Image (cartoon, grey):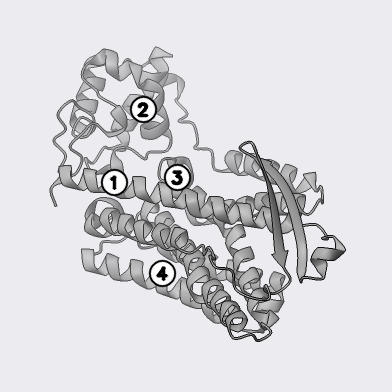
Amino acid sequence: MDPYITEWLNLIIRFAHLIVGIAWIGASFYFVWLDNHLEKPPEAKAEKGISGDLWAIHGGGFYEVAKYKLAPPKMPTTLHWFKWEAYTTWITGFLLLSLMFYVGAESYLIDPRVKDLTQWQAIGLGLGSIVIGVGSYELLVRTKLKDHGLVLAVILFAIATVLSYGLTQVFSARGAYMHMGAILGTIMAGNVFFGIMPSQRALVKAVEEGATPDSKYGLNAKLRSTHNTYITLPVLFIMISNHYPITYNHSANWLVLMAIILITAAVRQYFVLRHFGQQKPMVLVSSIIATIVLAYAIAPKTVELSAEQKQQGVSNAQVQHIIETRCSACHSEAPTDDVFKSPQGGVIFSDMASIKQWAPRIEARVVNSKDMPFMNKTQMTEEERLTLSLWLYQIN
């Protein structure tokens, strides 16, 4: 596919994914907050079957919200459903995954340094991992384990850890992270499609037929919705993680990912408890401390230069030659890379002044994390990285 067309498709699909994702997550967070803030209704309302109500003010108006214990006596003329936010988020997300990591498998998904795969092998492994991850969840959540939240969470976390490790053994680090995001995102959309919507349709059908709705449908939908709220923050992290190689480029990246999933789920737990009026600040404090500890643990080792090396002079000509040879294919005014046809990240190395301008990023991405050049397409050597490190020492 023409790189210019690919860039436009990427932009359009990513923009759409962002918009519908905000709509889905916003609605999900709102209803979790709403459900946790409902108060015991007045007796007149309770007699009508209302289990909780809430008053709010927003945008210059007052709102009164009431929730029925099971269902209203009869169906209202207009009933608003919340499903397309989830479906369109999943559809645009899958299109984006397909465009970047399947159509562009050789660029983003396949890393010969990890495992030399063909495009179709990579696609098969990617789709297979999603099926295994989502299938495992669906099988477990339909058993009696659903009534034992902690046990179910431990089992699912163990499965996720195995998948995370396995993906990092066959894909590029970025591709592995994105596929874990795809697995979690598909579980969330599946909770809507396989659990929440069927339960809600059963409730509506019972009301329309004048029957008493079975409470198991409401409980099932509530359970799936609760699962989604804890998965949300890990998915959001993974969505932005491709911009931060300090996480996915670590040698134990699969373990880093699982640690971040635990931390972000704990942060969500703090806010859920807060909705119930339970102040548990140590949950949030512990998450912050864990993040700091993780950041320290995975910090790239600073290149240690010997006294003899520090005495070596590195000329600007040497540095410029390395940058032109290894970096300018993607970071020039007219990139020559086969995939990237515009300067990536807006970084352009046109002369020595521009190279010095981006020196901090060169140190972070080329010397420390070694994330650049992208999947080392231009075969930068360790000796060249050391030369850049010596030059950075000189100019600091």
**N-terminal-most mark, 2 or 3:** 3
Find disc 2 in the rendering and name its residue. 362
Vertical order, 174 against 351 (above or below)? below
Residue pictured at 44% horizontal, 40% vertical = 244
Q: Residue beneath label 4, please?
A: 130
Labels 1 and 4 touching (C-beta < 8 A):
no
Q: CA distance from mark 3 to mark 4?
A: 19 Å
Residue type at numbered disc 1 = Ile
Q: Nearer the viewer, residue 122 or 39?
A: 39
| C-alpha gap between disc 1 and disc 3 | 17 Å
**Label placed on residue 240:** 3
Which SS class for mark 4? Answer: helix
368 or 241: nearer the viewer: 241
User: Hey, what amino acid is under mark 2?
Assistant: Ile
Q: CA distance from mark 1 to mark 4?
A: 24 Å
Asked whether the residues under the numbered discs 1 and 2 touch, taking CB atoms below 8 Å apart as contact, a structural biologist would say: no
